[in-house]
Image: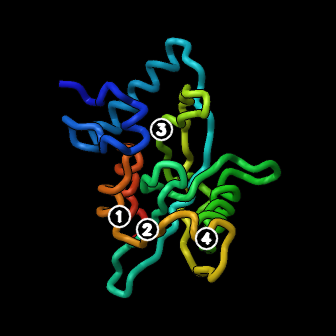
Amino acid sequence: MTIFDPNLKRQAAGELGRPVGFAPDVQALALRLIERIRLFLGGKPPAIQTAALPWRLRPDGTVEVLLATSRDTGRWVLPKGWPQKGRTLGESASREAYEEVGVRGRLTPREFGHYSYLKWLESGLNRRVRVSVFPLEVSEECDVWPEQGQREIHWTTCEIAAGRVDEPELAALLRKFPGEVT
């Protein structure tokens, strides 16, 4: 039984869905182990990106998170991007949340966790990317923002969000998050 479809590019683009064969938390653990082995054997370190995890509490106390679709593949993702000069990773994540999904709020300055994915380049090659995730308690939803209309956005529970994202490590983070808030 294979964990991943052999056509990784189509899988990364979300065309084939998630890896099959194991529970998402086991997949996330396996991916972390594979990455450690790859680095131990001299592999190139991954590029670094930063992501915001916009969240709020419903009146009944349920934690909701805000997902957006990526502009290129339409996959459900967190607002993320490259670190910005003169800003910490958390500040960069907060800026991405405003630009991509139009929210502002109180950022947790400490990384909640991280996940990895393959970013496909125009050349057809891929680059491993490690994404640092910073929770952002949303206090303002803007009427206008820079990337408005370029992606779909949706508030949902962490469990539903975990089922929508393609990255097993991100799904595991989303399932763990409500316990960190309450």
**Image quarter in which the N terminus is found:** top left
Please indicate whether residue 123 sits to the left or right of residue 2 in the image.
right
Alpha carbons under labels 2 and 4: distance apart: 18 Å
Q: Earlier in the sequence, mark 1 or mark 4?
A: 4
| Residue where numbered disc 2 is placed | 65
Sequence-wise first label, 3 or 2: 2
Q: Please, what secondary structure does the residue beneath circle 1 have? A: helix
Measured along the vertical axis of the image, is residue 24 above or below residue 150?
A: above
Question: The disc labelled 2 sits on which kind of residue?
Answer: Val
| Depth order, front residue of 131/5 | 5
Q: Earlier in the sequence, mark 1 or mark 3?
A: 3
Dots 2, 1 in contact, CB < 8 A: yes
- The residue carrying pointer 2 sits among few (fewer than 14), some (14 to 19) or many (20 or more) residues within 10 Å by Cα, namely many
Say which residue appears at 23% left-offset and 25% top-offset: 2
Q: Contact, CB < 8 Å: mark 1 with mark 3?
A: no
Going by the image, does 40 lie left or right of 148? left
Q: Residue at x 35, y 39 (%)?
A: 28
Q: Which residue is mark 4?
A: 148
**Is 94 placed above or below 34 here?**
below
- Estimate the spatial distance between the alpha carbons at disc 3 and disc 4, rounded to whole Å: 25 Å
Whichever of labels 3 and 4 marks the residue nearer the N terminus, that label is: 3
Q: Which residue is mark 1?
A: 158
Q: Residue at x 30, y 30 (%)?
A: 4
4, 64: nearer the viewer:
4
Q: Are marks 2 and 4 in contact (CB under 8 Å)?
A: no
Q: Is residue 135 left or right of residue 49?
A: left
Instruction: Give the x, y percent position of residue 169.
Output: 39, 43
Residue topped by disc 3: 117
